[in-house]
Each structure stands twice: as structure tokens, then as C-alpha cells.
Amino acid sequence: MKKIPILRLGRILLVSIQEDLTDNEAMQFQSDLVNKVAEIEALGVAVDITALDVVDSYMARVINDTASMVRLLGAEVVICGIQPYVAMTLIEMGRDLIGADCAFNLDQGLEMLRERIAHRGDIRFTGDGDE
Amino acid sequence: MQAARAARQMAEHLGFGRAQAYHVATAASELTANMAVHAGGGTLHLQPLTDNDGSIIGLEMRAEDQGPGIPDLDLAMTEGYSTARRLGCGLPGASRLMDEFSISSTFGQGTRIRAIKWCRHRPVDRS
Ligand SMILES: Nc1ncnc2c1ncn2[C@@H]1O[C@H](COP(=O)(O)OP(=O)(O)OP(=O)(O)O)[C@@H](O)[C@H]1O
Ligand SMILES: [Mg+2]
């Protein structure tokens, strides 16, 4: 079974969703991620989907559910790197298939997370690039 | 995902634009996922459509399975309707991504879906 690595940058976690995720792999990924968020009391999670050429309604649900779970735990979440043609396809398919906030790339995503976390006034934040 | 890749490659090979190729790939992914999830498997056929003079006018996609069939097609095409606690956006989404979309299903015997993407640079003439 494919395992999605979870990278840690201070109190921010970074995950990259890969293609061909089965139901079981998606569930494993989600439980790994929420456990990690809880364990380190993560303040933010950046979900990178640059690798996805196809985001069908199943992948959209995996992405949305993941974002909701992270938010429920109290962390901020940003989806990063959606490909332009993937975005066009999602719009054509209709409905707000991706219900989370998005950023152009990982850099912007991390910036967005830091701003949000700072805005929250969370004094516990000790990540890099911020004071 | 293999189906999606094949569909995208065929679309690009036939001269479709990048956006259209992504649409076709995503529709293929939806139909293949549906056969796997709701019908225990099935086959996706991809085929170029040509004019009388042999020039490419579109790409046809046919999904055929011997699953349980769909009892209520209108309901199945409704956004948000899913018997598997999924988003229920696959069929309505795929139909929007393609130019033509028709389902025929016999309860208990299976489902056939035929969808077409016309090449945009050609006028649609199916007389
Ligand atoms: N090939 C099929 N055989 C039998 N039933 C099907 C088939 N395809 C779709 N259905 C039925 O139609 C419903 C709607 O399909 P649709 O693809 O829109 O949603 P979904 O597959 O349930 O969820 P999603 O595609 O958003 O992950 C399904 O829940 C299922 O009941
Ligand atoms: Mg579906």
C-alpha cells in the first residue's frame, strides 16, 4: 500500500497527494494526517496537489474531507498547486467541488498559512519565517 | 487513472486542445470509477469519430458493464445523488464535460453510456 509522506516544517505540515489513490490508501492517509496534526498540535497544513492531472469527484471528495478533518482539529488548511487545466475542468464539472482555500503554489500556500495563523493571534506559533 | 491517461493521450493525439483533453480524461475517470464502484467492473471503449472523408470530427467514449443497472436515470443524473455515500457528482459532471451524453440501462442487466466530445474547430454537423 502506498504511503503518503508527511513533512514537518515547525508547526506546519506538508503533504503531497499523488495519483491513483485507492479508497484504503486515502483512508490511511487521512488517519495518518489527523494523528500527526493532533500529535504535534499543528497550526496549519498545506496539501499539495501539483501531481494530480485528473481530479475527479472521488479525488475532490478525498481532498475536501481531508481539509475538513484538519479544520475540525483546529488547524488552518490550504490546497496548493492545482493545475490550470484541472481547475478549468473542475469548474466545467460544476458545483464547488473543491471547498477549501487554494493557493497558486506551495510557497504561496505556506505564506497564506502563516498569515492566517498570525491573524489568529496564536502565540504558540514558532515556525520559521515568522517571529 | 489508466483510463484517464489513455483518454487524454488519445484526445491530444486527435488534435484536441489541452483543456478539452483534460475534460475527456476526467470524464473517462468518472465513468471508469462508476463501473468499478457500482457495477463490479466493466469496459471503457475509446474511439475516434471520422467524417466521410476520413477527417477526425470527435472522440467517442463508451462505458459498458454488466452490473445491476441504474433504476432511475434522472435521479442518477442529479447532482448530489449517490447510493454509495459519495459526492454524487460523477455522472452530472461527466455529462457536462462531454458534448453528448446518453445512458441506457436495464435494471439487473447492466449499463451503457455513450459520450462524445466533438473537435471544436469543426462545425457540429451530424445530419
Ligand atoms: N455503472 C453503474 N452501474 C450501476 N449504477 C451506477 C453506475 N454508475 C452510476 N450509478 C448509480 O448512479 C449514482 C450516481 O452516480 P455518480 O457517478 O453521479 O455518483 P457516485 O458515483 O455515487 O459518486 P461520485 O461519482 O461523486 O464519487 C451512483 O451512486 C449509483 O447509484
Ligand atoms: Mg461516480
Image: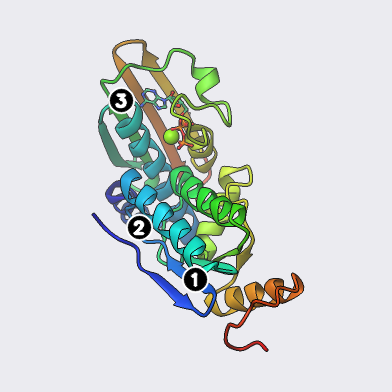
Q: Which residue is mark 3?
A: B39
How is the rendered protein coloured?
Answer: rainbow
Q: Which mark is residue B118?
A: none
The residue under the point 43% across, 28% down is B84
Q: Which residue is mark 2?
A: A19
Which x, y percent locates residue B94? 48, 38
**Does residue A43 appear anywhere in the picture?**
yes
Mark 1 belongs to which amino acid? Leu
Q: Between marks 1 and 2, how big is the CA–CA gap?
A: 20 Å
**Crowding at mark 1 (Cα within 10 Å: few <14, some 14-19, many 20+):** many
**Crowding at mark 3 (Cα within 10 Å: few <14, some 14-19, many 20+):** some
Q: In this rendering, would A70 be left or right of A28?
A: right
Q: Which mark is residue A13?
A: 1
Q: In this rendering, would B28 be left or right of B17?
A: left
What SS does tag 1 mark? strand
Pinpoint the chain carrying mark 2: A
Q: Earlier in the sequence, mark 1 or mark 2?
A: 1
What SS does tag 2 mark? loop
**Does residue B125 appear anywhere in the picture?**
no
Pinpoint the chain carrying mark 1: A
Position of the N terminus of chain A, as image quadrant, is bottom left
What SS does tag 3 mark? loop
**Crowding at mark 2 (Cα within 10 Å: few <14, some 14-19, many 20+):** some
